[in-house]
Image (cartoon, coloured by chain):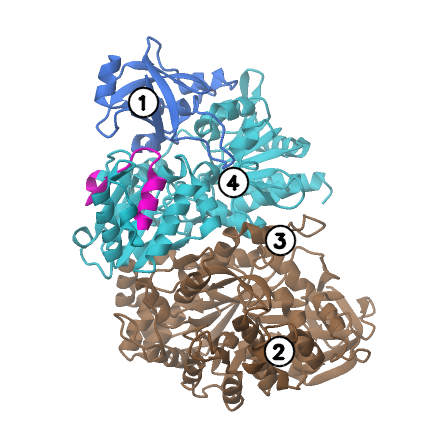
Chain colours: A brown, B cyan, C blue
């Protein structure tokens, strides 16, 4: 039995509506408890800001395309290298760190749970292997269904229950957590070198539209009772004028779930563009935020762009090819049979570039214009907008108008005529930041009932103690201190163990992977469906028996069984 | 007799997973669906019975404990140990290998460096527009084998993925799919081609440049022949490419090993990237060993680099030509070597072998091979895919778990390496 | 006479690659496939022994006619015989010139060595499975 007592913590725990109360936190055997014995180890937080462990609801850290990004970029590896030391293995990488690099750096920032943004089912085994080597964060994977043949055929036949059955079978087989759609329909079209241009544009051969894919998948997701909603990367990412497509996509979504959103739209900054081309490119964060404000069934995340070099990597193959045409950088592509695709290309976001400056402003605008922090979560679509180590700077920008103005003065001089940012006075407070970096994620991902994102007795003892006393710091002025504080915890505690202390990771880590197993009736068990089985063995190049990821790939197994309505 | 189905073949990069293996009396008695290479491997006999130690001019049997202790001592005593091979074993073992190299500050390299290492160098310059094998099977109406002879090296590639593999969008692959073979000699694969392009040795780069020029509309710059290929044929090939609905290029050692090496591959990748402006095209490497891509994947997620990683500075350091095995051996830089899942004495130039003869060498391998002659200790291990299981990465990056079809007393590579690693950590007080 | 030596994989080399102490492996990897005319010029019949000299040594192989090989080029399956005469210089790429060595070929009375003998010539000690 191991006990830990954190004394004098200044706790913000939005899921329990606790806002800067100084209290003690008692931990026993990895869980929060009411109290502990006098034998407990004691950490005195000295009034420091203490939050539940950070949760990143959309980050690309593990899997085939991430590793592609690594090995094609030795220059990125050279940009951040540490040797083996103590409990820490050697690390490499700046925008696409090695798995240990990701894990240690996230841990230093107080993050204890990560949702991998995209996992192709056929290659899920690779994601799970890398999860094990990201040992200081619990992990789970968004599973890609945007170009899934069996799903598209079932949608074409109008069979929502069959769609749910296929998704259910696949998630169980590959140990996925949630349903991801990336440029729905577009990734299949890209396997002919084409794309879809709007949500009504039918996919070649399959003749279903992105709108149908989105709507049917959302319904199927709710039939399966999954903890997270469908997670959508809209069509037309990065295109001037794409905000209408985004509004059209969001407008498809009914309110189907009382406990959480019905749709999670990710990295919306990349989807909030006005104009008809690069010359009149401008921000449309206002209509998007207005729309989201009126719809509790939608949650978005920022996808903030920060200036500097990074690597873009998404399942959105055709979009990445367009970046190649624009920038002529080294470009990788990886289409996955019957399922989805991916593309990778390095990029530099420059202040001198007007489009980049507008993009930078849009992410911040979305966070400031969305009224409820529960509806706009903090991400950079790591590493697409920026490496996650930039989160502290983003927090500071959101909390300080002064900092925003200072940064705004350094971007392209015409930016002001394209974006509303300079006129926005709002400064987020500590509570709102806590929502946007953990509590909001826990609710959006359906994890709060699994003990994540809060510190109620019974919860997982994932705690981050930041070296800052919020009663002594005015974040709107001392933004440098805000950046420093969120860059490195005094203590990051995971399952009741101190895993990181002032940037030094102290243990090997033993993480859990969360996945879902929806229970469906025999009639909807695709493992017995003759048509599904026949098509599988005919068109895939892996036998159906060899496709599922064996449970031994998971370090610690957190299987979530759900009752499906099929 | 038991029949094990859906067995994963541990020979080449095709990683066929539809084999049927008949096991009787603790032996593989027959293999169905496999090519000759896979069938022979799965039925392999003549395993080394126990670890051996070279004692002067004799060989002695030793125990696993002694062999493991020897290896740990050797690696700890070395200033610059080389840990080489890795492509013939499962990923779980490859991961331990990386930890070991990091611990002893050695150089870890895999067989890529003498196979598709140059392809990786090219990818690091210009990227890799590729796809999984099933995408090609289902869609490609044009397949190009460049500097690759799959009939000999990847025998079922054509029937499982290309020429004879019917796909969703191509009901009769043999009729609807065109094949172009580019090679310096008329191989068996060339005889199947709709269009055989014979290049003078060393001429691939020029031919690729010529094709790129034609695709970009600069045909007037092309001389009557380029590296032995006529302008007419070059135009024909370029047109076939542009008119295809989906073209897939598979290339082999004909590009990576001839003069120019990674520059040849780079040019081929750039050709494919450009073709993507007109139609859909992909390019992929015909990886040799069944898990060489796995060693690249493992090395990359753990260290940041796919092969040739030097830990002597404490950080991971990558510089092919300096930190790759052939060079480290040729320069006589390493003072000990651990070889796993490969046979450098058969596949490396002689100067490397001369140095192997001068340093302590331990090998993990089920069979006596050429490297055995240079070992101080050889530790026989189970064969992944037969009596050990573990993850392998197919040539297109798809990870499949190999199966165990029978049990033996041999430990797996992962077990032996883990024991060595633990022993070393204990001795270092970790 | 000078020839361009290409080394590469063959099915027979692959089938015996896990059994390198076998006669079949030695035979396959010590075979030098040549064009019929080149063999005629050197006065060679199928199976005759030849001495192949490269930049760092010489090795005895057997010549076999092949319709696949061009005049002036020879093909040797990947293995210890070819590597016996291949230089270790990789020109900073990690990859030796496995397909671009120029070699001298002449008939010889010597017999090809066994794989064991090749290894021992370089300082190894052959292991015989009992």
In the rendering, at what x and y percent does residue A38 appear? 83, 69
The residue at the point 30 percent across, 33 percent down is: B200
Which of the labelled discs sits on residue B98, or is there none? none
Q: Nearer the viewer, residue A366 or B131?
A: A366
Few, some or many C-alpha atoms within 10 Å of disc 1 (few <14, some 14-19, many ≥20)? many
Which residue is labeled 3 in the image?
Answer: A79
Q: Are marks 3 and 1 on the same chain?
A: no
The residue at the point 35 percent across, 26 percent down is: C5
Q: Which residues are magenta?
A: B191-213
Query: Which subunit holds the residue at mark 1?
Result: C
Whole-number angstrom distance, CA of label 2 to CA of label 4: 46 Å
Q: Secondary structure at mark 2?
A: helix
In the rendering, at what x and y percent does residue A235 appear? 41, 74
Whole-number angstrom distance, CA of label 4 to CA of label 1: 33 Å
Image quarter in which the N terminus of chain A is found:
bottom right
Q: Are marks 4 and 1 on the same chain?
A: no
Is A446 drawn above or below residue A29 in the view shown? below
Q: Quadrant of residue A46?
A: bottom right
Query: Which subunit holds the residue at mark 2?
Result: A
Query: Which subunit holds the residue at mark 3?
Result: A
Whole-number angstrom distance, CA of label 2 to CA of label 1: 69 Å
Which residue is labeled 4 in the image?
Answer: B413
Is A84 drawn above or below residue A419 in the view shown? above
In the rendering, at what x and y percent does residue A303 appear? 54, 73
Q: Secondary structure at mark 3?
A: loop
In the rendering, at what x and y percent does residue A215 appear? 38, 81
Q: Secondary structure at mark 4?
A: helix
Judge depth for marks 2 and 4 and give the one in front: 2
């Amino acid at each position: 039995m191991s006990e830990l007592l954190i004394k004098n913590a200044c706790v913000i725990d939005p899921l329990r509506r606790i806002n800067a109360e100084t209290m003690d936190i008692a931990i026993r055997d990895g869980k929060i408890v009411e109290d502990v014995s006098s034998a407990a180890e004691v950490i005195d937080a000295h009034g420091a800001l203490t939050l539940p462990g950070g949760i990143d609801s959309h980050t690309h850290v593990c899997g085939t395309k991430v590793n592609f990004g690594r090995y094609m970029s030795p220059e990125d590896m050279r940009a951040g290298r540490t040797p083996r030391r103590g409990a820490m293995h050697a690390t490499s990488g700046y925008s696409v760190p090695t798995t240990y690099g990701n894990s240690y750096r996230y841990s230093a920032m107080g993050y204890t749970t990560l949702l991998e943004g995209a996992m192709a089912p056929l290659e899920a085994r690779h994601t799970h292997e890398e999860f094990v080597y990201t040992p200081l964060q619990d992990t789970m994977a968004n599973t890609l269904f945007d170009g899934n043949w069996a799903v598209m055929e079932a949608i074409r036949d109008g069979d929502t229950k069959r769609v749910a059955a296929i998704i259910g079978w696949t998630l169980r087989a590959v140990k996925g957590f949630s349903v991801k759609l990336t440029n729905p329909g577009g990734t299949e079209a890209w396997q002919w070198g084409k794309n879809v241009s709007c949500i009504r544009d039918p996919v070649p051969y399959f003749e279903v539209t992105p709108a149908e894919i989105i709507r049917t998948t959302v319904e199927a997701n709710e039939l399966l009772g999954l903890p997270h909603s469908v997670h959508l990367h809209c069509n037309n990412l990065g295109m001037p004028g794409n905000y209408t497509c985004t509004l059209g996509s969001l407008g498809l979504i009914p309110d189907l779930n009382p406990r959480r959103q019905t749709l999670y739209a990710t990295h919306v900054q990349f989807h909030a563009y006005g104009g008809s081309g690069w010359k009149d490119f401008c921000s449309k964060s206002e209509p998007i935020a207005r729309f989201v404000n009126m719809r509790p069934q939608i949650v978005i995340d920022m996808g903030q762009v920060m200036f500097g070099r990074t690597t873009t990597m998404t399942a959105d193959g055709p979009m990445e090819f367009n970046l190649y045409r624009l920038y002529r950088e080294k470009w990788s592509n990886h289409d996955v049979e019957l399922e989805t695709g991916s593309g990778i290309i390095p990029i530099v976001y420059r202040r001198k570039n007007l489009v980049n400056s507008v993009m930078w402003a849009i992410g911040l605008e979305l966070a400031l214009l969305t009224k409820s922090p529960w509806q706009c979560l903090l991400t950079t679509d790591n590493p697409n907008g920026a490496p996650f180590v930039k989160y502290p700077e983003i927090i500071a920008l959101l909390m300080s108008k002064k900092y925003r103005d200072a940064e705004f003065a350094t971007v392209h001089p015409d930016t002001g005529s394209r974006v509303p940012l300079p006129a926005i006075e709002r400064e987020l407070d500590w509570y709102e930041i806590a929502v946007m970096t953990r509590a909001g994620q826990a609710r959006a991902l359906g994890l709060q009932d699994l003990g994540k994102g809060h510190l109620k007795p019974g919860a997982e003892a994932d705690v981050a103690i930041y070296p800052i006393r919020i009663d002594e710091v005015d974040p709107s002025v001392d933004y440098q201190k805000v950046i420093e504080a969120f860059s490195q915890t005094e203590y990051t505690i995971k399952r009741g163990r101190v895993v990181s202390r002032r940037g030094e990771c102290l243990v090997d880590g033993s993480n859990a992977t969360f996945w879902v197993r929806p229970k469906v009736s025999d009639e909807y068990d695709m493992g017995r469906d003759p048509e599904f089985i026949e098509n599988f063995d005919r068109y895939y190049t892996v036998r159906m028996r060899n496709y599922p990821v064996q449970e031994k790939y998971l370090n610690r197994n957190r299987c979530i069984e759900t009752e499906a309505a099929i | 007799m038991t029949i094990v189905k859906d067995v994963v073949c541990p020979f080449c990069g095709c990683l066929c997973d539809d084999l049927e293996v008949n096991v009787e009396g603790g032996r593989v008695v027959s293999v169905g669906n496999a090519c000759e290479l896979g069938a022979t491997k799965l039925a392999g006999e003549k395993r080394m019975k126990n670890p051996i130690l070279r004692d002067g001019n004799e060989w002695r049997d030793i125990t696993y404990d002694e062999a493991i202790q020897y290896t740990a001592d050797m690696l700890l005593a070395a200033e610059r140990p080389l840990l080489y091979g890795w492509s013939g074993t499962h990923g779980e073992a490859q991961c331990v290998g990386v930890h070991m190299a990091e611990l002893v500050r050695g150089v870890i390299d895999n067989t890529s460096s003498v196979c598709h290492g140059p392809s990786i160098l090219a990818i690091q310059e210009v990227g890799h527009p590729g796809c999984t094998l099933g995408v090609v099977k289902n869609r490609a109406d044009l397949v190009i084998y460049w500097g690759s002879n799959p009939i000999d090296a990847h025998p079922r590639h054509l029937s499982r993925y290309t020429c004879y593999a019917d796909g969703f969008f191509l009901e009769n692959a043999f009729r609807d799919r065109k094949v172009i073979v580019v090679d310096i000699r008329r191989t068996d694969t060339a005889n199947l081609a709709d269009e055989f392009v014979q290049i003078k040795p060393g001429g691939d780069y020029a031919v690729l440049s010529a094709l790129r020029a034609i695709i970009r509309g600069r045909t007037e710059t092309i001389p009557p022949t380029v590296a032995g290929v006529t302008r007419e044929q070059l135009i024909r090939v370029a047109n076939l490419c542009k008119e295809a609905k989906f073209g897939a290029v598979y290339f082999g050692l004909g590009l990576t090993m001839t003069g120019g090496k990674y520059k040849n591959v780079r040019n081929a990748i750039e050709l494919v990237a450009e073709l993507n402006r007109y139609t859909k095209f992909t390019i992929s490497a015909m990886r040799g060993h069944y898990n060489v891509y796995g060693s690249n994947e493992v090395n990359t997620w753990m260290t940041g680099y796919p092969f040739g990683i030097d830990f002597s500075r404490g950080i991971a350091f990558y510089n092919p030509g300096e930190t790759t095995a052939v060079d480290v051996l040729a320069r006589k830089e390493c003072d000990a070597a651990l070889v796993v899942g490969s046979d450098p004495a058969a596949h490396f130039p002689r100067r490397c072998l001369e140095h192997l003869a001068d340093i302590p060498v331990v090998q993990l391998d089920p069979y006596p091979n050429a490297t055995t002659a240079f070992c101080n200790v050889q530790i026989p291990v189970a064969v992944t895919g037969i009596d050990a299981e573990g993850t392998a990465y197919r040539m297109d990056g798809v990870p499949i778990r190999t199966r165990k079809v029978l049990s033996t007393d041999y430990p797996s590579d992962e077990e032996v390496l883990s024991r060595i690693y633990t022993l070393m950590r204990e001795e270092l007080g970790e | 006479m000078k020839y361009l030596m290409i080394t590469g994989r063959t099915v027979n080399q692959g089938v015996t690659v896990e059994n390198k102490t076998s006669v079949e492996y030695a035979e396959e990897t010590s075979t030098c496939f040549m064009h019929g005319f080149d063999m005629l010029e050197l006065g060679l019949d199928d199976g005759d022994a030849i001495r192949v000299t490269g930049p760092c040594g010489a090795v005895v192989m057997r010549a076999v006619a092949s319709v696949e090989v061009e005049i002036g080029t020879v093909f040797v399956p990947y293995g210890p015989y070819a590597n016996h005469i291949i230089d270790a210089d990789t020109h900073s790429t990690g990859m030796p010139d496995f397909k671009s060595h120029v070699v001298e070929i002449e008939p010889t009375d010597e017999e090809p060595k066994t794989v064991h003998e090749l290894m021992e010539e370089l300082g190894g000690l052959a292991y015989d499975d009992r």
